[in-house]
Amino acid sequence: MFRLINQTLVLLLVLILLGSAALWFLSGHSTLAFDPQPKALGTGTMVAVRLVNPHGVRRLSLLIEQNGATVATMDTRNAWNWLTFWRVHQDPEVRHFIAGQGVTSKLHEGKARLVLVSESNDLRAALDSVSTDVDVILKPPSVSADGFQHYINQGGSELVLLTPSGLWEDAGVRSGDTEYPSFPVPGNPNQRASLFAFPWDMPLDTQPIVFVQNAAGNLATATFSFKVFPKKFRSRDLAIDDQFLNKVVNQIDPGGTGDLLTRFLRINSQLRRENNKTLADLRKKTADHFLWTKPFLQLANSKVESEFADVRTYVYQGKKVDQQVHLGFDLAVVAHTPVVAANDGQVVWAAPLGIYGNCIVVDHGMGLQSIYGHLSEIAVKEGGAVKRGDVMGKSGSTGLAGGDHLHFSMQVNGVQVNPMEWWDEHWIHDHVRERLK
């Protein structure tokens, strides 16, 4: 009897040991990485950490080490059940924390080390850490704007000068939801120039501001004097038929599925958004100074068929089927008219682009770019320099075009603006040249 009890106890002990060993074997370490790597900490700096552990973590601590002292700026704990942890599966995740908040009185400006420590949510409770050197920056930068009176056309562009001071990393203009970077002013190392847009559909009471921000996330802003002039944009009904649909749809989307109208609506909305995002992303390929000196050229002897911000209602078989905004000028002369560079610059796109057909984009510096669409031929290559008046291709009807013409538009930091200002030497003199003297 006692022998049987002893054997049972031994078997039970063996099962407990085997179970514990299995749970220990299922336990593991966490993989941690800052994403992105922080460079500085301020009074409250957002820090992102990529965390990989199939069981998750039950404790995370964010520490700041400076001059031999350690300050805990964040400590979180999660409940743990050792009986069920092995059934939990946690996908890789990115967690965000505020570093420096509430502990700045214990820090001073200078070098420090940011450390994140995790405890795995399993039997082993393994400790893992990731750390990086940072600069503690507690004083916010400051910024002031120029003293000019800024007259801004709805849908147009404007240039403002700003003077940042203190430790800073980014400076520019915020207009609506968009940030526009600033660039050095030639001959004045203390000033920056920011070219920004006032989009055609932005509320007229929107206040553009200049801003400056340091690597720690400390932000300062300032206002400047401005007045917005409202503009009335046209609304037009545009009749489309099966002949037009057959031409443009099968050219742009030759392998698409569905009837012609369904495919056209997808092209006119979804593909239009995708193409405009591609154009906007070209803002990253801009020079830090203007590459041009003379006013921009309009296609010579051209007839304006569509204007900037025309609201188009598409009518098919007597029914309104779609509405889009045309953010450029349609300029027509004769078929296959030579298309010239509107100004000096560098080609940053020379390839087909969906609704724009064969398309060229030229960068003119400081976020200013010109766009040429529907071309029948492209005679330049990406990366090449062009001069004002250089022939870059020929007009055509590629993409979402009913007939031969040039679609011409301009964008400032990826936001399309009215080109008429840039064709106007007087406007350029008052709003750009005089500011940069």
Image: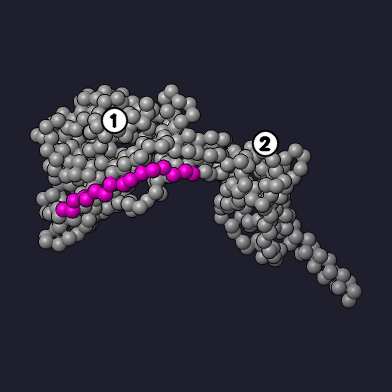
Which residue is tagged 1? 429
Magenta segment boundaries in residue numbering:
221-236
In the image, 306 versus 386, the foreground residue is 306
Q: Position of residue 120 (x, y in %)?
A: 68, 54
Please name the residue that numbered disc 2 is placed on: 110
**Residue at x 63% of width, y 42% of height:** 138
| Of labels 2 and 1, the one closer to you | 1
Q: Residue furthest right?
A: 2
- Residue at 69 percent across and 40 percent down: it is 108
Q: Residue at x 32, y 52 (%)?
A: 204
Could you say where residue 437 lies in the image, as x and y percent from the top left? 37, 26
Q: Is residue 210 visible?
A: yes
Which class describes the residues within 10 Å of circle 1: few (<14), some (14-19), or many (20+)? some
Q: Secondary structure at mark 2?
A: strand
At a point 47% along the width and 43% down the height, the residue shown is 222
Instruction: Estimate the x, y position of residue 299 in percent, counting from the top left.
Output: 17, 32
Q: Is residue 118 left or right of residue 249?
A: right
Q: Is residue 105 left or right of residue 96?
A: right
- Report the side of 210 relative to 388 (left or right): right
209 versus 394 height, above or below: below
Amino acid on which the number 1 mark rests in the picture? His
Give the amino acid type for the residue marked by disc 2 in the picture: Gly
